[in-house]
Image (cartoon, grey):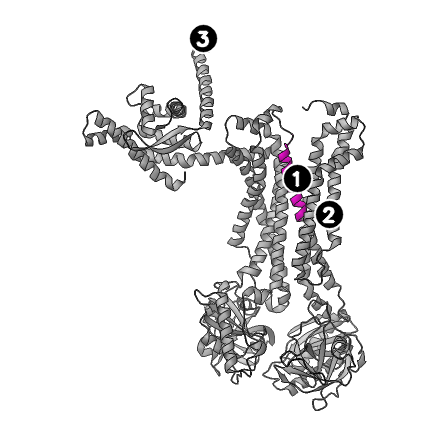
């Protein structure tokens, strides 16, 4: 069960992370994970550690950039911010997702298969 | 992020994350330990996260590269013609480069095969460049601290026989017992020499070269302990050296060098010393120390160690065996072939740019939707590196074939003009090893990046918006791309002109040597060398008697017209000997005039087909107890005896010790002695009957073909002394002289080949760019034609566009060629630095090509209906 959820999330995880950074500004991994839980409306939608492979992927593609800063509690954490190419990628991915979602939705309408 | 930093960075981040989680749980009311435990659970497996992180890190990079390669392969398969041309060009360029590198590496850098650290071995002789005395060597060995050890070696001919089968002549080297230990090699069979073997009176022991053991003794493992006669002395074979080892020359066996019993400081024999630098010592340090030692010996033994014998000459492998000048030429060849590679790269860059231009629409779109500039560049670079990698693979096979062919030839004629002849053949190892492979890989990668970077930069820097506005096809290049094309072409032309000029100089230098007049007809004379072993012909009387009998017998052989002997052949450099003319005071006793001296028999000049200018040749009556006589050549007479040469008295000096006075009895025509066959020097001729030597060259002039003559010489010699094989020859003198310029021939041909390739490539590049420039202006040409322009007008229009880079290329090429000329002039002095014929030819070719590059597409453009041309570009 849990692995199914993780797989599904991996495809859209990029989109969600980018969107979160877009709306909320730079976040560190813990804050991101918390935000994801809020959005997913579950107490533990995924293990917080699985965020890291996605983060490194996005960073290698140049869509987000990490920098070390201090939190309010004076703990040090790595904050990730959206880059310009990341903003463009977000728009692309969002469009693609919407088109895909729209297509699936249309197919699921009663009588569309005929 | 650097991979090494990634792991600790991740740790730091995870720690921070866990801390924040623990804070949260603590705030909810858990105890610190509970909070930490809950944080860990919430986070999940740290190890698993790290693994996934690590995989993602490398995977992305690799995935992208794999995708780029697949796309590149697909692109190339779509245009197989272009790919084939590109790969072929690269294969030739890379292959030839690797061939030249392998050869230059073998000749200049690798040194002797199977010797440890060639670069730490130095070669020493007395200051004159030849010979040294045993006592001096011992002092050097004892006193020098910058050398870990020194050895002495001496090349000698060795008549070897293993019983009734008769004797054969081989080359041998006498070595001190520590020699092989010094060079870091030991016999693969048997034992090395020990200090016991080099004691006077010790039994003779022999070490065989692997090749000899294989050829002559069939690799018989029972060779150890076998008795061989070497120069008449029985010796025992104690070992065989490993295959491929041949130090320091092309000898077949080694014997111990026993210190001469009557060693005197003023007898300098024709051997040289070698030393291995001590750890931490450098060549400059060694030179300085040897100079100090030399001066110290000069102070202790002022009678023998002074003047040119004072400071020892310390040379590297390259200085000693190859020669500085040849080294320069090999390096120049390497440079030349590098030029060819650069020209090929420039062409490929232009080609790739034109090709990518066709895809520039797609590239612009890609960049508009967010592909970074680096990603686009990376794709183009992967394409170019892929092409050059394929070129490298084909080039490797080409190189292997080329090096094998060269090695087969080079091992037959030696390595440079300094080392022409038998003594250095078959010594160097020309095989392609890991160094050649590394070089090829580096060049392949380098050229791929080099010719890919310009198109990649240009294409990815374009204004995407502007491109798209022009309809998204982008078939025309913008100004900066065109500028890059022209710059490349101008560079190509410069390089091609320089190469052509260089080749021209070398060709002329070779031709000068080839067509030089040696002063006699060398095709009718057979030459062979006889070296009398000291054991059986110890005294001058015996030596003279032998050669007298030999010449008499040979004279009687059918087909022989004239026979003579000489200590040196024409075309052989002579060491200058100081002399004094009776009645002419020398300006300084330390600085006497010097000339080469040759010992000759009577009828020497007749054997060469020349007559004396004045006076007579040596006669049989010029006995040792008669008045000493001498012959001078015309150069000598002109320079030193302008008031008449006959009956003047001359005497030679040997290390400041004067010899007897000799009377001039004849003036001979100039016969060339210099190895480059081009200049006549002053030469003295001394009669063999009055001063016989053990080693003489036979010259036989014949009526019949030289093949039969050679057999006659061999037969006569065998009849006189069956145990005395010929040291060298018999060979027609013309062929022997040809060996002198073989090295130059090879160099000249190589350069000419490279220059031709360079010109061809540059022409192709120039033509392509010009044609492209013309076709880009098709519309404009159409309009102008409609308004009445002629072919000439159009030509002029297009040529002015290309005038700047063409002019730049030609001017740059000529300037660089003049510079090169000055550099090469040091090597081949007879050649004029800026050979206007060659430069004019190269420039003319390139100019003609540019005009053709305009004409052909211009004519095509002109035949197009102006209306069609005026239509909006589709």
Q: Which residue is mark 1?
A: B486
Q: Which mark is residue B843?
A: 2
Q: Which mark is residue B157?
A: none
Magenta stretch secondary structure, dominant? helix
Q: Quadrant of the C terminus of chain B?
A: top right
> For mark 2, does the 10 Å Cα neighbourhood hold few (<14), some (14 to 19), or many (20 or more) residues?
many
Q: How many marks can you see?
A: 3
Label 3: state its secondary structure: loop
Q: Residue A38 sits in which quadrant?
A: top left
Which residue is outermost to the front? B587
| Tag 2 subunit | B
Compared with B306, B353 (above or below) is: above
> For mark 3, does the 10 Å Cα neighbourhood hold few (<14), some (14 to 19), or many (20 or more) residues?
few
Q: Which residue is mark 3?
A: A111
Separation of disc 1 and disc 2 at Cα?
A: 17 Å
Which residue is outermost to the bottom? B625
């Amino acid at each position: 069960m849990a692995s199914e959820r993780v797989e599904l999330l991996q495809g859209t995880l990029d989109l969600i992370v980018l969107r979160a950074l877009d709306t909320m500004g730079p976040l560190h991994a813990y804050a991101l994970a918390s935000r994801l839980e809020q959005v997913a409306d579950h107490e533990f939608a995924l293990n917080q550690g699985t965020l890291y492979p996605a983060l490194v992927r996005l960073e290698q593609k140049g869509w987000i950039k990490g920098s070390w800063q201090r939190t309010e509690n004076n703990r040090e954490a790595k904050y990730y911010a959206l880059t310009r190419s990341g903003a463009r990628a977000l728009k692309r991915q969002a469009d693609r997702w919407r088109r895909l979602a729209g297509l699936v939705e249309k197919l699921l309408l009663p009588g569309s298969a005929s | 992020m650097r991979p090494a930093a990634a792991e600790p960075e991740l740790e730091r981040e995870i720690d921070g994350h866990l801390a924040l989680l623990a804070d949260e749980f603590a705030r909810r009311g858990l105890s610190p330990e509970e909070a930490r435990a809950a944080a860990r659970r919430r986070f999940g497996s740290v190890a698993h996260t790290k693994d996934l992180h690590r995989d993602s890190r490398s995977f992305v990079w690799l995935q992208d590269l794999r995708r780029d390669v697949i796309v590149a392969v697909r692109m190339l398969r779509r245009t197989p013609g272009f790919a084939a041309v590109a790969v072929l060009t690269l294969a030739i360029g890379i292959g030839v480069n690797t061939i030249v590198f392998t050869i230059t590496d073998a000749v200049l850098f690798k040194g002797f095969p199977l010797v440890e650290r060639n670069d730490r071995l130095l070669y020493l002789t007395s200051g004159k460049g030849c010979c040294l005395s045993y006592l001096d060597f011992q002092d050097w060995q004892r006193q020098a601290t910058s050398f870990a050890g020194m050895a002495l070696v001496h090349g000698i001919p060795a008549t070897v026989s293993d019983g009734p089968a008769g004797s054969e002549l081989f080359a041998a080297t006498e070595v001190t017992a520590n020699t092989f230990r010094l060079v870091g090699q030991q016999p693969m069979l048997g034992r090395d020499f020990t200090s016991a073997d080099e004691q006077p009176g010790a039994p003779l022991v022999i070490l065989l070269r692997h090749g000899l053991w294989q050829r002559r003794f069939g690799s018989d493992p029972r060779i150890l302990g076998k008795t061989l006669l070497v120069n008449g002395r029985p010796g025992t074979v104690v070992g065989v050296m490993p295959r491929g080892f041949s130090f320091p020359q092309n000898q077949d066996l080694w014997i111990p060098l026993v210190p001469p019993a009557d060693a005197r400081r003023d007898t300098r024999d024709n051997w040289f010393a070698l030393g291995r630098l001590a750890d931490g010592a450098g060549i400059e340090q060694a030179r300085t120390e040897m100079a100090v030692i030399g001066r110290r010996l000069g102070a202790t033994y002022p009678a023998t160690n002074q003047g040119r014998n004072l400071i020892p000459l310390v040379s590297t492998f390259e200085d000693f065996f190859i020669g500085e000048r040849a080294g320069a030429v090999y390096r120049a060849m390497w440079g030349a072939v590098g030029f060819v590679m650069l020209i090929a790269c420039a062409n490929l860059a232009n080609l790739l740019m034109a090709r990518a231009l066709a895809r520039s629409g797609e590239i612009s779109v890609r960049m508009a939707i967010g592909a970074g500039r680096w990603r686009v560049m990376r794709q183009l670079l992967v394409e170019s590196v892929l092409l050059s990698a394929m070129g490298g693979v084909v080039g490797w096979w080409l190189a292997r074939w080329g090096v094998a062919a060269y090695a087969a030839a080079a091992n037959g004629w030696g390595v440079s003009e300094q080392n022409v002849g038998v003594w250095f053949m078959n010594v160097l190892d020309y095989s392609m090893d890991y160094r050649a492979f590394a070089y090829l890989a580096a060049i392949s990668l380098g050229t791929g990046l080099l010719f890919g970077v310009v198109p990649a930069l240009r294409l990815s820097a374009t204004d995407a918006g502007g491109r798209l506005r022009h309809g998204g096809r982008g078939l025309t290049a913008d100004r900066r791309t065109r500028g890059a094309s022209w710059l490349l072409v101008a560079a190509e032309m410069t390089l091609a002109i320089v190469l052509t000029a260089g080749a021209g100089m070398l060709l002329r230098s070779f031709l000068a040597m080839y067509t030089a007049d040696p002063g006699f007809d060398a095709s009718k004379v057979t030459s062979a060398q006889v070296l009398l072993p000291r054991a059986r012909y110890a005294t001058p009387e015996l030596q003279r008697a032998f050669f007298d009998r030999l010449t008499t017998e040979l004279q009687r052989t059918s087909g022989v017209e004239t026979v003579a002997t000489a200590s040196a052949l024409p075309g052989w450099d002579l060491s200058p000997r100081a002399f004094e003319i009776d009645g002419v005071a020398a300006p300084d006793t330390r600085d006497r005039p010097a000339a080469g001296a040759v010992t000759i028999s009577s009828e020497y000049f007749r054997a060469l087909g020349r007559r004396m200018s004045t006076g007579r040749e040596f006669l049989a009556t010029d006995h040792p107890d008669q008045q000493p006589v001498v012959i001078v050549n015309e150069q000598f007479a002109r320079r030193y005896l302008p008031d008449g040469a006959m009956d003047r008295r001359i005497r030679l000096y040997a290390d400041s010790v004067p010899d007897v006075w000799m009377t001039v009895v004849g003036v001979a025509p100039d016969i060339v002695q210099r190895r480059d066959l081009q200049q006549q020097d002053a030469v003295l001729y001394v009669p063999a009957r009055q001063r016989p030597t053990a080693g003489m060259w036979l010259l036989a002039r014949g009526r019949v073909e030289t093949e039969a003559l050679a057999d006659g010489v061999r037969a006569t010699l065998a009849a006189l002394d069956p145990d005395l094989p010929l040291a060298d020859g018999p060979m027609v003198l013309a062929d022997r002289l040809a060996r002198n310029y073989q090295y130059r021939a090879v160099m000249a041909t190589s350069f000419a080949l490279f220059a031709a390739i360079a010109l061809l490539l540059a022409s192709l590049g120039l033509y392509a760019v010009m044609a492209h420039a013309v076709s880009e202006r098709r519309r404009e040409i159409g309009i102008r034609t409609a308004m009445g322009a002629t072919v000439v007008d159009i030509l002029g229009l297009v040529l002015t566009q290309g005038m700047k880079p063409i002019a730049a290329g030609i001017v740059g090429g000529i300037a660089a060629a003049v510079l090169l000329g000055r550099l090469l002039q040091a090597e081949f002095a007879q050649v004029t630095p800026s050979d206007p014929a060659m430069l004019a030819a190269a420039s003319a070719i390139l100019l003609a090509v540019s005009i053709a590059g305009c004409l052909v597409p211009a004519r095509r453009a002109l035949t197009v209906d102006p209306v069609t041309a005026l239509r909006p570009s589709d």
